[in-house]
Image (tube, helix red, strand yellow):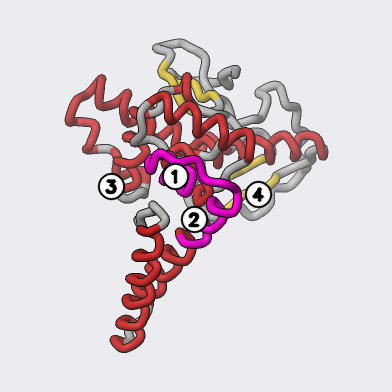
């Protein structure tokens, strides 16, 4: 996996971030070649409001916190390349945040906590990103498996992580499917396809009930939802699955 090159002292690769020191190569605009030639059309369009996002602004592609504006002439191939870069950013952002938090902690100690609020993410999300990155080093990460799926096995021993992540890559697991497979593995049993599907459905139902309980303001409805959740948790427990 090759690092993108640009300016600065960090480099992103698929599945994480690494520091490369002063003067080293780094990420340019994610997925967009620096050599991309753009011919600007005469006359500027009204710029979008919001703050400019430097890492996503390159050539004709002008990104702000409100969206993207294409200024001037571009080819379909250039648009496709930029689009691919955006999707790569979406897949890698939490790996990069977690890796950078660990790097900042190692270099600056407790001082790093003073700047993390610029991310806009909650403290819980940032702690989770760092924890997952600490628990699953780049050597065990799978490019075709999402960060959320990796997070489901972060608390397991390395050998179990390896086995389940391989399975997730082979079978294209969703987060819910990985959660069910993890719970089955922790119960020291290998479920058949029908049993695994039932686990997935139970987890989804419990998650939906939790959301409904948080949204409803009617106390009678909340009591009914709590009763339904209790029954499902009891059934899940008999199957060897917790309701977390």
Q: Can you see residue 100?
A: no
Query: Tag 4: Cα neighbours inside 10 Å, few (<14), some, or many (≥20)?
Result: some
Residue placed under numbered mark 1 in the picture: 184
The part of the chain drawn in magenta is 178-202
Q: Which residue is at the front of the view, 105 or 66?
A: 105
Is residue 188 a member of the stretch shown in magenta? Answer: yes
Distance Cα–Cα, label 3 vs label 1: 30 Å
Local secondary structure at mark 4: strand
Is residue 92 a member of the stretch shown in magenta? Answer: no
Whether residue 151 sits left or right of residue 75 in the image: it is: left
Query: Tag 3: Cα neighbours inside 10 Å, few (<14), some, or many (≥20)?
Result: few
Residue placed under numbered mark 2 in the picture: 199
Q: For the residues carrying marks 4 and 1, which lies nearer the camera in this image?
A: 1
Whether residue 190 sits left or right of residue 61 in the image: it is: left
Distance Cα–Cα, label 1 vs label 2: 9 Å
Q: Residue at x 47, y 62 (%)?
A: 202
Point out residue 68 in the picture as x, y percentages from the top left corner: 62, 49
Point out residue 172 in the picture as x, y percentages from the top left corner: 62, 41
């Amino acid at each position: 996996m090759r690092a993108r090159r640009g300016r600065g002292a960090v480099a992103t690769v698929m599945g994480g971030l690494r520091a490369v020191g002063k003067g080293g190569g780094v990420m340019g605009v994610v997925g967009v070649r620096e050599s991309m030639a753009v011919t600007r059309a005469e006359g500027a369009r009204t710029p979008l409001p919001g703050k400019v996002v430097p890492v996503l602004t390159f050539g004709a592609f002008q990104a702000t916190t409100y969206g993207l504006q294409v200024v001037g002439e571009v080819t379909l191939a250039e648009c496709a390349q930029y689009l691919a870069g955006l999707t790569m950013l979406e897949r890698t952002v939490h790996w990069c945040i977690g890796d950078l938090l660990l790097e900042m902690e190692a270099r600056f100690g407790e001082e790093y906590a003073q700047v993390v609020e610029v991310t806009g993410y909650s403290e819980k999300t940032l702690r989770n990103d760092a924890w997952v990155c600490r628990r699953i080093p780049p050597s065990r990460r799978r490019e075709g498996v999402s960060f959320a799926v990796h997070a489901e096995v972060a608390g397991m021993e390395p050998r179990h992580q390896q086995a389940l992540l391989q399975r997730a890559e082979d079978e294209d697991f969703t987060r819910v499917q990985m959660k069910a497979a993890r719970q089955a593995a922790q119960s020291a049993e290998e479920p058949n396809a029908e049993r695994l599907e039932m686990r997935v459905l139970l987890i989804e139902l419990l998650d939906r009930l939790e959301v409904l309980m948080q949204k409803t303001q009617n106390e009678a409805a909340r009591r009914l939802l709590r009763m339904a959740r209790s029954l499902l948790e009891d059934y899940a427990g008999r199957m060897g699955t917790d309701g977390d």
